[in-house]
Structures are given as structure tokens and as C-alpha cells.
Amino acid sequence: MAIHVNGGMCKLLLLLLLVMLGFPAGRTLAEAPPGNAPNARLVYWIPVHETIESGLEAFLNRAIDDAEKASAQWIVLDINTLGGRVDSAEGIGERIRSSKIPTVAFVHGKAASAGSYIALNAGKIVMAPGSTIGAAAVVDPAGREIDNPKVVSHWASEMRSAAEMRGRNGLIAEGMVDKNLTVAMPEIGRTAEKGEIVSLTAEEAVKVGYAEAIAGDREGVLAYLNAGDSRVIDFQPSPAERLARILTNPAVMTILLLVGIAGVAIELFVPGFGVPGILGIAAFALYFFAHYAAGFAGLEDIVLFVAGIALMFVEVFVPGFGIFGAIGIVCLISGVLMAAYDTGRALVSLGVAAAVAAVVTALFIKFFKHRGVWNRFILKDEQKQELGYVPSAPKASLLGKTGEAITPLRPAGTALFEGTRVDVVTSGEYIPAGSKVVVNKVEGTWVQVSLWKEEH
């Protein structure tokens, strides 16, 4: 059992490491086509679509790094998003501000919530007809607006700072977050009263200085940038990054941890190596793959986790008074937390997953305990007479009787008593075959003899 489990586990863990090495986070798919001069004017066109989260942040960091290495002329952020996580948006905004390449935000749909913050950090904003920017109120995962004054104040100040850094009216940016403000916008003949969150159309954004131009498509944006003859690099997420964006979602991450913990625990305590163990290892592999592909996890985090798994199995099959198990648990938790983008959120996900996994594992143990690994170490078979087993005859009647050793006793052997062969043992002395022996002690089926002497 021990060899079989460890062998299968090692193969899967090795596969996990190979998967990590096979999908490097820094791989660039938007490579320049052959035949172009290395000093050609380049415009990097980078999509900022769907939900803003840690996976998108990692992708944008890679894209901007690539544009800087290529000495691009412009970076265009193609924005159409309803927002997402504030912390990820702040990280993206910081990277945009530090970019060595001039940045332009092209809003062709909605730049709402965190999306508006990303747009405000760009050097220029170009909006498509019918697009909007603003409505950046802070909401919880259920979509309910958060009224916490500290949270609202912090996000409003971030929005204002981003706007003023680019020479825009900071009060309008604050009004996109805080509905308790009155924001006058005489340029468009409108005042956002208290209770109203500011959101601007493309035409309004141009009039109040929040957008530099209106363009309906890529050609229009390039024309505005005087880059019509530039080569455009459509920088797209790699397949690994697309998958990572799904798997690093907090809800998905919690499910992966739940399946991983429950699968490994069930494999340890209930059946032999099979479906639970495979599912558990696969879930952990996806967790680390996603964070590695997103650029959050390093090989050292994966090695730490693998070491934790190994120590847990060592504790099961080579008991170490709980020391191996305790160190293994610490390694497991450390590996999971170190690989995550947000340690606090990962800790919550891990806690929820562990609690639910404990319940699931307990149910499996209750209903399938007869298949548990511990039963491999316990002999439960009973040699009952009704099952055909013949019980041994009692040996107490042999006490004091004499017989003959029919095999050498060294110290165990066989002696003959009144025509019956009996397995006997001496106290340690050697007695040759054919010697006369006497029974000194009987305990159950155990018979001790010694060499018979005349004084007996």
C-alpha cells in the first residue's frame, strides 16, 4: 500500500512540476511578424475587457513590459469593462503611470467603476460614440453599494489623484465614486446633485476635459495619434493566461482548494489510491498552475507544497509522533498562501475550503471506514469454529509429563508425549533429538520443556 500510494503520488506531483515548466508566465504571443525592420514604428494594442482582477493585472504587466522592450511608439488600452477588484485596478493604474511608453485609453464600450480608474491613469483618453466613463461606486461581490465612509473616501481620493495627475478636474472623478457630493459641470450645463453618481458620455467627456477625442474605431484612434503608418501589435493573452484568469477567481480558487484538501484527506484515511486522490492532486495542480501562469507563484512555492504532501504521507506510513505531519501541514499552508496574489483572500479561501473539506472527509470516513487505510494495519480475521477452523486442544494436561524430543530443540522444536506430537520450546538451552524432556510450564498452546534428569 505505501509503495503504491507514494509511487502514484510522486508521478502526479512530477507531472505538476512539468506543467508549470511548460507554461511560463512570461511567454509572449504577440511576436512581430517576420520581414519587418526592427526599428519600425510600433503601436501595442492591448485589450482590457471583462472583469478586472489579478489575472488581468498580470497580463497587462507582461504586455507593458513587452512594449517597453520593443520601444513601442504608443500603448493603446482597448477598454470595455464594467469594473472589478479595486486592488487589482490600483496595481494596473500604478503600472500604467510608470510606463516608459506613452499610453492611450480607447473606451469603446463602458469604462465603469475600476475601468474608469484605469482609463484616468492613461496619458490620453479617446472614446467611441455611445461609450461612457464613470459610475465608479464601490460595491461588494453581490453588487450592493458599500457605504463605508473610509472605503468610499479612499477610492474617491484615488480617482481624484489619477484625474489631477493628467490635468483633469478632480472633483468630477470624486463624484464618480461619492454620491454625497454636488458636482457642477457648467461645460455641459449639468450638475450632479447629491445622491447621483457621475457618469459621462463620450461627448460630455470631451467637453469637460476627460477625453481628448472621439473615434469610432482603431483607424480613427491611430489617425488621432498620427500613427496611421505604424505597425500594430495585437497583444493577446496566452491560452495559459486565459485559463489562469478563470482559475484565480476567488470563488473558483476556493473550490479548487476544497477539492484538493478533501481529495487528499479522503485518500489518506479512507480508500486506496484512486479517484479522490487523483481529483485532489488535479485540483491542487490547477491552483498552482493558474497562479504560476499569472505570474504570482514561483517554483519555490510549488516545491514547498510538494514537500508538505510528501511529509504528510511520511507521517501516515512512518509515524513520527506527529512531527512530520505538523511540518507537512505548515508547508502545505505556506505553499498555498505564498503562491496567491492576495494572501489575505487566499487565507479566507483556504479556511473555508478546509472547514467544508473536514465535513466531507468525516462523512466519507463514517460511511466507508471499512475501506480505510488504517484497516490495512489491523488483523480483523477471526478463526471461528463455525467458519471451519478447528481450535487447538488445551495443553494444560501436559504439565509435569515426560516425553521425547523427536527434533533438535534450538530452542523450539517438536516432542512426542504419549503418542502425540507437540510443538515445544526450551528456556534457551539446546536439546538434541532423542533426548527425554519434561514439561515445566504451559500457557495456552505454549509449552516449555527442559532436559529430563533422574531427580525429576
Image: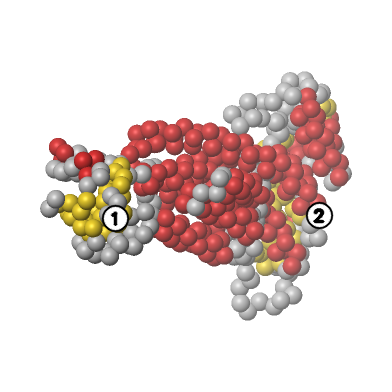
The image quadrant of residue 184 is top right
Q: Residue at x 62, y 69 (%)?
A: 31
Indicate the position of residue 119 as horizontal and vertical percent values.
Answer: 73, 45
- The answer to whether 31 is drawn above or below residue 114 in the figure is below
Q: Which mark is residue 453?
A: 1
The image quadrant of residue 444 is top left
Indicate the position of residue 313 as horizontal and vertical percent values.
Answer: 49, 51
Indicate the position of residue 198 as horizontal and vertical percent values.
Answer: 74, 30
Circle nearer the viewer, 2 or 1: 1
* Callout 2 amino acid: Ser
Badge 1 crowding class, 10 Å Cα cut-off, few under 14, some 14 to 19, many 20 or more, is few
Q: Residue at x 55, y 49 (%)?
A: 320
What kind of colouring is applied to the model shown?
Answer: secondary structure
- The answer to whether 312 is drawn above or below residue 396 in the figure is below
Residue 397 seen in this snapshot = yes
Residue 286 seen in this snapshot = no
Horizontally, is 100 left or right of 228 in the view? right
Query: At numbered mark 1, what does the secondary structure look like: helix, strand or loop?
Result: loop
Task: Evaluate if marks 2 and 1 touch, with contact meaning CB atoms under 8 Å apart.
Answer: no
Name the quarter where the N terminus is drawn: bottom left
Horizontally, is 429 left or right of 336 in the view? left
What residue would you read off at disc 2? 98
Q: In the displayed image of the protein, which residue is found farthest to the top?
A: 194
For marks 2 and 1, the one nearer the N-term is 2
* Callout 1 amino acid: Lys
Q: Residue at x 44, y 37 (%)?
A: 361
